[in-house]
Image: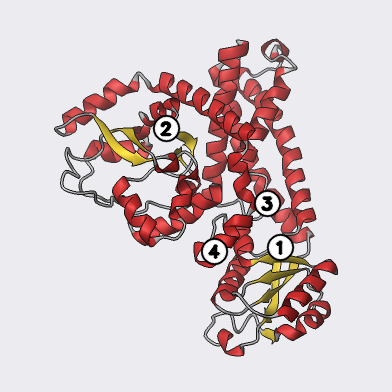
Amino acid sequence: MNIKGSSIRSLLILIGDILIVPFSYVAGYYLRFGTLSSFREKFALWFIPLIIISYLAIFHFFDLYRLKKNYFTINSFVTISLSVVVASVFVSFLNYGIFLFPIGRGILVIANIVLLFLAFVWRGFCYQLFKYLIKPMRLLIVGAGKAGQEIAQIIEQAGGNFEVVGFIEDDKNKIEKSALKEKIEILGTSDQLLTFAEKHRIDQIVLAFGEKDNPQLTKDILSARLRGIEVIDMPNMYQALKKRIPINYVDENWFLIEKGFEHSTNILVIKVKRLIDIIVSSIILLISLPLWPLIALFIKINSRGPSFYVQKRVGKNESLFSLYKFRSMIDKAEEDEAVWADENDKRITLVGKILRKLHLDELPQFWNVIKGEMSLVGPRPERPEFVEELNKKIPYYSLRHFMKPGITGWAQVNYPYASSLKDSQEKMEYDLYYV
């Protein structure tokens, strides 16, 4: 993937954030008091760099420095909003819990609203800027079968930074049924790869074919790479653009050599993530504790049964743990057997709908995080009955249990409620990308 271009984009966004974070806090102070006369009394100069570093680290954790998509979307806004909330909670802990600076809650709230707006607009602006200033990468796809046509569609939808010049395919009939046949043509066969790569000034070759016993093709692809043309396989192109792993196009060998999984085993990353889990969960539990009796009371008034719901879920390494929730369904809703739930499930009570809408039913799960059974971010934990079924029907499903489950996760941000096998497979692709 155009490493140089991506690095420039990431650096530009980073520089913008370094300016946006302190500006937002200055703006928050000014909007709160209408003056900056006593700003230095409230903010120690050395504390501002610490605030900046905190936001940059959490923005990086939420993958906000990869400008490979249009940020003017609902999903992007939700991701940026979540990252700002997590960062603001962490800064609040530093402010009130460690350094005891007199920064008021009003300043923090206003500053983070300003920061959210500027971070969102800045990323959208950068996307549009690079879209018009940087010429698209010219791509040649080797393989016009199902994998080739699917990645071509994804690249076309991504727009802006990519231009698919054509396919290289030995079987020309493969493209006949494609909706792309009027836009993208088969340029030639595999023995002409180097000729067409030079003729059409190709920047990158995308490998979208299955196992082929074609030593000459392998040799030509290597020659193209040595001439400065980037080479990427279809699964890696797919995950770079869609932020999910296409499990129908990967095998065990792909997982063996994929380097992304190394981040999940990094000791420093694990310890820092655990520290953030404990700090953020403790703060949220303390802040939300006054709401718990009210929530429990409303649940009791609305329907018979206990206010809390304890259910066995599958955690890291497929170990079982007890997940805590405020009850949002009728009592004994799954007494007979485990049943897939959906957004419009008739078993959900009136109060339960409100709790789910506001995610208040998940507040007790922060105790699961404190206990070390869950994390703030990770694949959502499923019922043992569902895991047993999904392990049989979805390839590599067990890999999502390589790390702790989370209260929220990459799949939850990018995909709606999973209420079927197909939904679970698509969500699992996002989970694997996060893992």
- The vertical placement of 408 against 135, above or below, is above
Label disc, if present, on residue 67 of the rendered structure = 3
Say what secondary structure mark 2 lies in.
Answer: loop
Report the residue at 59% width, 61% height from top.
253
Q: CA distance from mark 1 to mark 2?
A: 42 Å
- Type of the residue with mark 2: Glu
Q: CA distance from mark 3 to mark 4?
A: 28 Å
Nearer the N terminus, badge 1 or badge 4?
A: 1
Q: Nearer the viewer, residue 285 or 291?
A: 285
Where is residue 311, by image quadrant? top left
- Residue 339 pos. (x, y %): 24, 51
Nearer to us of marks 3 and 4 is 4
Asked if marks 1 and 3 touch (Cβ < 8 Å), the reply is no
Report the residue at 76% width, 85% height from top.
192
Say what secondary structure mark 3 lies in.
Answer: loop
- The vertical placement of 152 against 115, above or below, is below
Label disc, if present, on residue 373 of the rendered structure = 2
Nearer the N terminus, badge 2 or badge 3?
A: 3
Nearer to us of marks 1 and 2 is 2
Residue occupied by mark 1: 161
Q: Nearer the viewer, residue 19 or 191?
A: 191
Q: CA distance from mark 1 to mark 4?
A: 29 Å
Residue occupied by mark 4: 251
Residue 62 seen: no
Q: Is residue 250 left or right of residue 356?
A: right
Say what secondary structure mark 4 lies in.
Answer: loop
Asked if marks 1 and 4 touch (Cβ < 8 Å), the reply is no
- Type of the residue with mark 1: Asn
Q: Residues within 10 Å of mark 3 (few under 14, many from 20)?
A: many
Q: CA distance from mark 4 to mark 2?
A: 30 Å
- The vertical placement of 428 against 347, above or below, is below
